[in-house]
Amino acid sequence: MPVPIYNTITVIGLGLIGSSVIRAAQSQGLAKQITAYDRDQAVRDCAKRIGLGDRVTDTLEEAVADADLVLMAVPVGAMASVAEAIAPALKQGAVIADTGSTKTSVIRDVAPHLPDHCQFLPSHPIAGTEYSGPEAGFATLFKDRYWIIIPDGVDDEAVSAFCQFLEGMGAIVEAMSAEYHDRVLAITSHLPHLIAYTIVGTAFDFEQQIRNDVIRFSASGFRDFTRIAASDPVMWRDVFINNADAVLEMLGRFNEDLTYLQRAIRWKEADKLEDLFSRTRDIRAKIKDIGQLD
Ligand code: NAP
């Protein structure tokens, strides 16, 4: 069993990610005390009932007052208001981290609010499911999954402790710049979600008869898109609003490639289609090789 990395940690936002961090930290003994907070009374009641953390507080100020590590696991559009609210109550030397899916926007929104006696360590776990809420979390969500950190300007000791904490949950830590993160995630995560939301939305715009058939015959590919398109609407609304530049850049490239395929289909250029489909199959094999396929 690993030794506790922190005396006290506080997790703000008890959805899929926040509750999974608490469960993982509890099961691995990574903190002596874990405090949980969510703005929603029903979520706080649920957290108490299912034993998330050692205590659940009713105010943000109380939640962060003793914390050595504060982890903000709220939608990226809510990060600024949380940072502003906790700032006056933060302990000297506390490390503030987040799990947001966009990084330049979170740094822009959070950093100005935090006092000089604290350090901000932005991060993003590359793990998730289509479920949300405190009961969706589980202790092994981050096992063997990448967890990106943006350690610019944070002292080595604080970075090292946070990395040990993440590794204690089974994550593989990778450092990069916020800009690079946002471009990579735009193509690997944000664009696929946009495409899934679009396909499912388009299908459901059909008239009633087709709609029933969409559901009846969904196993033929559509079902995989519906899983992604079932992801939390508020979280994803915030992601697209806050990573607009990178998403629009990748969407532009995607549209060009789609036009190329459209033309290949029209002119029956079978070799072009087969060539692309073979290359994409290789990519899946590579993801499997590095252990990132469930
Ligand atoms: P979630 O399941 O929807 O949970 C978010 C929780 O935060 C909800 O309980 C929400 O309460 C609460 N909340 C919202 N605003 C708040 C505020 N101002 N103060 C306190 N609590 C607040 O979301 P999630 O999937 O855990 O995602 C959390 C963060 O991690 C997001 O930034 C997301 O981008 C990121 N992330 C998500 C995934 C994923 O696959 N889901 C993966 C990696 C990173 P209400 O219900 O009342 O709004």
Image: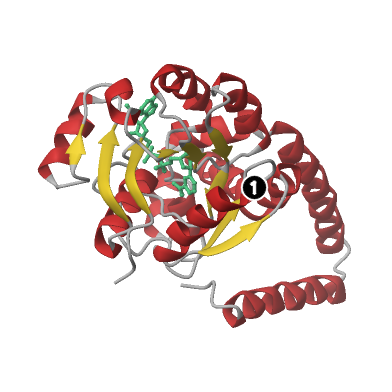
Question: For mark 1, what is the residue?
Answer: 151
Q: In the visual, does 91 lie left or right of 37?
A: right
Q: In the visual, does 247 lie left or right of 273?
A: left
Q: Residue 31, percent across and down?
A: 31, 52
Q: Quadrant of residue 240?
A: top right
Point 48% across, 70% down: residue: 144
Position of 215 relative to 246 (above/below): below
Point 48% across, 24% down: residue: 83
Dot 1: element: loop
Q: Quadrant of residue 90?
A: top left
Q: How many marks?
A: 1
Point 41% across, 29% down: residue: 91
Type of the residue with mark 1: Pro
Q: Residue 268, percent across and down?
A: 85, 68
Residue at the left extreme? 49
Quarter holding the N terminus?
Answer: bottom left
State yes or no: Cβ of the residue under disc 1 lies below 8 Å from any atom of ligand 1: no
Q: Quadrant of ligand 1?
A: top left
Residue situated in front as seen by the camera: 131 or 251: 131
Residue 158 visible in this rendered orientation of the protein: yes
Position of 67 relative to 6 (above/below): above
Residue situated in front as seen by the camera: 156 or 172: 156
Residue 132 visible in this rendered orientation of the protein: no
Q: Residue 201, percent across and down?
A: 52, 39
Q: Residue 250, percent across and down?
A: 77, 46
Point 43% across, 17% down: residue: 88
Residues packed near mark 1 inside 10 Å, few (<14), some (14 to 19) or many (20 plus)? many
Position of 149 relative to 275 (above/below): above
- Colour scheme of this structure image? secondary structure
